[in-house]
Amino acid sequence: MKNRVWKALALSCFLCLILSGCFFRAVGELYAVPQPPEDYKALQARLSEVIAAGGEYAAPLSGELIQSVQLQDLDGDGLQEALAFFRFPNEELPLKIYIFRQVGEEYELLTRVEGAGAAINSVEYAQLDDEPYKEIIVSWQISDIVHSLAAYSVSPGETEELLRTDYMGYKTADLDGDGQQELVVLRDPVTAPPRAELYDFDGVLSMTGWAPLSGGITGIADGGMRGGYLVDRVPALFITSSYAENGAITDVFTCRGGKLKNITLDASTGESGETVRYYTQVSPTDINGDGILELPQPVPLTDYKITTASVNFWLIHWRQFDAEGRAVPVFTTYHNERDGWYFIFPEAWGDNVTLSRSDLPGGGERSVTFSHWTGDEGTEPRSFLTIYKLTGTNRMIRAKSGERFFLYPVQEPLNADDHNVIYAAEFRDGWDCGLTEDEARERFKLIKTDWYNGY
């Protein structure tokens, strides 16, 4: 097994080199020219034959798999097949996926998948049926705005098209917990509202049910389809769409008895009203790390003595959902995307908080102050906590100024250059917020980019 892993890693590196044209160097640059193993040479020979026949590399344009040559164990035997993506400009079906399997130190053509269109938009591999081979799901780009989705079953010398449909988006997920993935396709039929269709395998891959998406959506958000879990670890699919003007809405789908259901949809309005939001800087995420996806519910904070219609600060109520579509509160945060941090509110604070910013000229010190305020215009907000983002050459001195204490790093760095950014905090005397310095550190978090979610 270890040998197979190392061989797979070596082949991946080799393919990167040959596809970039950087594998071979002049003798003067190296003491010895590295020689790839014979089976890797055999694969390169097969690829060269395709190119000699008029093919040109045509890697998928989007998704997680965008290499011109990809390694995938399609049949589960522990050996990875090589899939190469080509375009033959002058043929009726110009787009082709060649699938090679390894036999000893040689590579032979297993089969190929062919399609029409301008490009291959994306590719995915999933176990959709009960056969040993994984299926290949391909999005063919017919034009800039038209895409066709197809699923293929492959075996030696054969390719069977299991499904073909137009689509707005798609996602594979094991929604019914049977260990086999289902395919959910989002469609916008001409004569019907947008909907999610469930395709499952029972002898054939066919649509077993559908459920509507919320009305008022204008398109699927980037990275807006993701699998996750509800309360009690129920599998679900979370679909976030652009909504109305500058808003977002998330529909949550489950599978029961082979049927798809939008559990957050309000039948009276035709929308998932519980998940609508007009502050879209945050996205659904497992913010507390318990394996269950939380959805954000932004609430605008009233600014003291500011009467403009724009909202400067938002609280984010994070909520999980159960299988019946009921919201379960988790906690509340303030997210400061500009400075890269968020803070978890104690329940005792409630919503009686107002915030204000103070940025020193030059950008070396930016701060947000939390104040307790009931909203009564006749009373002044009582400040109780300020959080600072400190940069610049004297950031260490400013981090220790007055009653300030370190948030991140949690203590003074041994070397002043260890952290280019220091986060510090200071309690104010206006109101007792009930936190100690250690408790404030526990509630302070850095915003980390989730490349899958886009957040």
Image (spheres, rainbow, N blue to C red):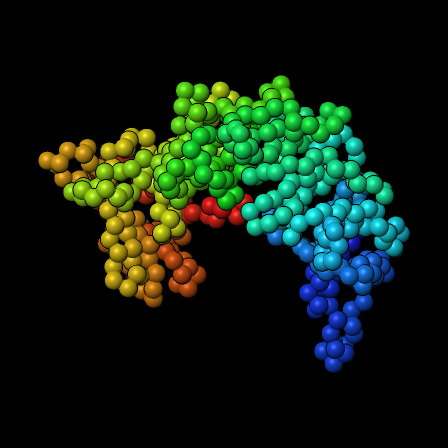
Residue 239: x and y, percent?
51, 35
- Residue at the (64%, 42%) spot, across then down: 148
Q: Quadrant of residue 329?
A: top left
Relative to 360, is 64 on the left or the right? right
Horizontal and vertical percent position of residue 212:
51, 27
Q: Residue furthest right?
A: 104
Q: Position of residue 143 (x, y in %)?
A: 60, 49
Above-or-below relation of 231 to 107: above
Residue 5 or 99: which is nearer the viewer?
A: 99
User: Which residue is drawn at the image coordinates 71% and 51% (left, top)?
Assistant: 95
Q: Residue furthest bottom?
A: 28
Quadrant hosting residue 150:
top right
| In front of the other: 218 or 326 | 218
Question: How many numbered callouts?
Answer: 0
Q: Report the side of 221 relative to 444 (left or right).
A: right
* Residue 234 visible, this orientation: no
Which residue occupies 39% across, 33% down? 276
Task: Give the percent coordinates (x, y) of residue 5.
Answer: 76, 50
- Please state which of residues 383 and 409 is positioned toward the viewer in this rendering: 383
**Is 139 left, or right, of 324 in this rendering?**
right
What residue sits 74% from the left and 81% below the top? 28
In this rendered view, identify the residue nearer to me: 25 or 96. Answer: 96
Q: Can residue 224 be seen in this snapshot? A: yes
